[in-house]
Amino acid sequence: PVLVVDFGAQYAQLIARRVREANVFSEVVPSTMAADEMLAKEPAAIILSGGPSSVYEDGAPKLDPALLEAGVPVFGMCYGFQAMVQALGGTVERTGLSEYGSTPAQVSDTESTLFNGQPAEQSVWMSHGDSATSAPEGMRVTAATSGAPVAAIEDDERRLYGVQWHPEVMHSTFGQRVLENFLLRGAGLSGEWTAANVVESLVADVKETIGDKRVLCALSGGVDSSVAAALVQRAVGDQLTCVFVDHGLLRSGEAEQVEKEFVEATGVDLVVVDAREQFLSALAGVSDPEEKRKIIGREFIRVFEQAARDIVGSGEREGHPVEFLVQGTLYPDVVESGGGTGTANIKSHHNVGGLPDDLQFKLVEPLRLLFKDEVRQVGLELGVPEVIVWRQPFPGPGLGIRIVGEVTADRLDILRAADEIARHELSAAGLDRDIWQCPVVLLADVRSVGVQGDGRTYGHPVVLRPVSSEDAMTADWTRVPYEVLAKISTRITNEVREVNRVVLDVTSKPPGTIEWE
Ligand code: XMP
């Protein structure tokens, strides 16, 4: 892999993604990992990320010079660049010429390894207080800005490169080209990391891990669990059993898409548990959001546990007990929990989500090295239906937390109808990729007076909550064109009898969460 050494910047994951966009596999490792351990991974190249520190500060993350002497191509960015300059004998000083934001850079050699094929002036994204004032011996300076006389260095012999700016952010107009030049020309890598190759190697891994054992997967109908299941199916066929719990809190058409289209396309062995009644009666009379969430979580585990027992005890494939449970864990979770180091697709023995002790599984996490957009590519490659691959995030508790008030069968029907119209019109307007997700919320305990046809009505409002986001941690409300909003509003109030008012949520996150409950 290409190792992205994380010096504590929020940019390391982004760099890893950019490397993969060049079809080269990358992994994030913390800068605290020992150089030996990094080199033991036999990296094809090493990228040193930016970071919040000054190289002079006490406790500033250290760059072990061994990484620069191992014969592995290295590319330093921002803090990583400065750490590299310092380690190689150049000078880094506080010049008082800090630069933040878009800055013009002058490239002095447009035929160099990094800048080949690019213009002599380009806009780069800077964020630095210290500057390199002299390059290490033997290194060429190939770009400068007004605040950074040494803004890019190159050494083709030792294959060491660096830039003072952040090539990974979009505001660096030729950033991706600079990065690709490093990977393909500097490090001599070939871009072979494509969805097709990824599928092939993940399938081989899963096959080896699982052998002839049986595997269970809780399918939610979301992107991650669906793609994980399809991948495991490809690897071990009907040793995999998927359990789909229909809790009755799904949106219109979703259960059918899983039960029919997904099964047809992937051939997974699916057990559907119809638990709609069970969930509804457990939720009766409850309107507190946290309590609803707890009940839904608890009932889910009960149903899944029973299904697991039935399958384990079914004796259909005697001698091959269910030993593994598939989880759709993604790379950002792995990196954030500090575990960005292992390539194994299996975690230790684990008692999952409150399952009882006599049902112990090992986890298979075939997507643990992938980002969301890569999961989607892999899904397409595996033939997972597009309606599922491009599905927007949907919370586990489903529509249960989009009805403000008690959840009842009637209210679910109202919300499903309104939600279907909103989704349809947003898609028809081509907004699916601009919108991260658009919850539709039924204010079931609120009534307002309206006039529909010739009569007075006393109906419920629904709230549209379209948000734009990168990762759901923060979000802004999406500026959906008025005509589209008008169409949604007209259709919902015409077609869903119980709703006489459509309102738009114009709150960012923070302070408002994306979901209302
Ligand atoms: P909030 O409402 O916290 O939501 O801004 C952030 C993201 O998480 C989703 N979400 C959930 N997903 N189980 C899930 O699997 C949950 O209980 C849950 N609650 C919220 C929400 O849809 C949004 O994408």
Image: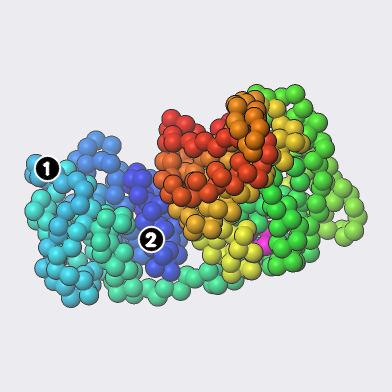
- Look at the picture and state if 317 lies above or below 297: below
The x, y position of residue 285, in whole percent, is 75, 24
Q: Nearer the viewer, residue 380 or 452?
A: 452
- Mark 1 vs mark 2, foreground winner is 2
- Look at the picture and state if 104 lies above or below 177: above
* Disc 1/disc 2 C-alpha distance (Å): 30 Å
Label 1 CB less than 8 angstroms from ligand 1:
no
How packed mark 1 is, by other alpha carbons closer than 10 Å (few <14, some 14-19, many 20 or more), is some
Question: How many numbered marks, from 0 up?
Answer: 2
SS state under label 2: helix
Instruction: Please tell me which of labels 1 and 2 falls first in the chain.
Output: 2
How packed mark 2 is, by other alpha carbons closer than 10 Å (few <14, some 14-19, many 20 or more), is many
The x, y position of residue 292, in whole percent, is 68, 29
Which numbered disc covers residue 18? 2
Which residue in the structure is indicated by mark 1?
94
Q: Main secondary structure of the magenta part?
A: helix
Q: Nearer the viewer, residue 268 or 386?
A: 386
| In this picture, residue 261 sits left or right of residue 161 | right
Task: Residue at 31% x, 64% y: name it.
Answer: 176
The range drawn in magenta is 227-231
- Look at the picture and state if 106 lies above or below 8: below
Task: Residue at 91% x, 55% y: name it.
Answer: 315
